[in-house]
Amino acid sequence: EIVMTQSPATLSVSPGERATLSCRASQSVSSNLAWYQQKPGQAPRLLIYGASTRATGIPARFSGSGSGTEFTLTISSLQSEDFAVYYCQQYNNWLLTFGGGTKVEIK
Amino acid sequence: EVQLVQSGAEVKKPGESLKISCKGSGYSFTSYWIGWVRQMPGKGLEWMGIIYPGDSDTRYSPSFQGQVTISADKSISTAYLQWSSLKASDTAMYYCARGTPPRNYFDYWGQGTLVTVSS
């Protein structure tokens, strides 16, 4: 099983600032990496797939990068609606796995 | 419009059986995978398993193999997650989500089904 490790667990950021979230895989997943956003009481929402491709309707302030074992989700200028929990997920093989999540909170 | 609509919240006793559902619409149900994801209270997302309704090919996470059964009825565009004997530790929110072939990231999600198991 590929273990996905996200850091930090909690990120405190002021509105308008940049947020950088990390996701590390225990072995290479190539570019088969997705990012999701989950707000309280809601289902997760796909933000990024293929490590760097924004899903339909996702604002350009969200960007993904990386390949192999190291990945980053960047939110260029945090808006109030961006405070949420973010999960990465690898889909390089049939045993899909999620990271533990990063909570982005208001500083 | 793609939609996944899940069945309503359930309250069960330990040892009881349960089957929850996820109905897809707005797309070709047999051309995409449907995955199930567990979220225990205050915790993260855990992938449980996935099914391809076109031919019922099913894969399970080792953590859930033997604990649940995933099935689908393509004639009514519905996937299912079932337990034969619930435990208190099965209390969680369960989401279905559409997996995009050939690799499975989840582009559409159901609203979730809350399952509470308590004596």
Image (spheres, coloured by chain):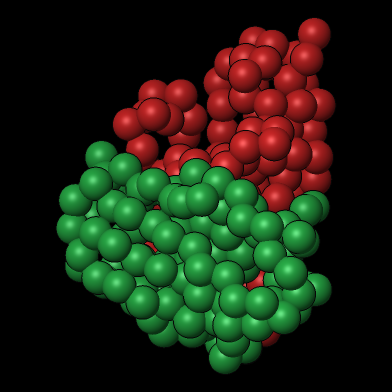
Chain colours: A green, B red
Residue at 72% x, 45% y: name it: B113
Q: Is residue B4 visible?
A: no
Relative to B22, is A30 on the left or the right? Answer: left
- Quadrant where the N terminus of chain A is found in the figure: top left
Residue at 76% x, 27% y: name it: B116
Up-down relation of residue B27 to residue B70 (above or below): below
Front-most of residues A6 and A77: A77
Front-most of residues B57 and B105: B105
Up-down relation of residue A83 to residue B41 (above or below): below
Up-down relation of residue B113 to residue A32 (above or below): above
Residue A105: quarter of image: bottom right
Residue A14: quarter of image: bottom right
Query: Percent x, y for residue B53?
Result: 42, 60
Query: Percent x, y for residue B67?
Result: 46, 24
Residue at 36% x, 48% y: name it: A4
Residue at 58% x, 70% y: name it: A19
Query: Percent x, y for residue A63?
Result: 48, 81
Q: Is residue A50 visible?
A: yes
Q: How many marks?
A: 0
Residue A79: quarter of image: bottom right
Relative to A62, is B23 on the left or the right? Answer: right
Up-down relation of residue B91 to residue A44 (above or below): above
Front-most of residues B73 and B42: B42
Front-most of residues A81 and B111: A81
Query: Percent x, y for residue A37?
Result: 61, 64
- Quadrant where the C terminus of chain A is found in the figure: bottom right
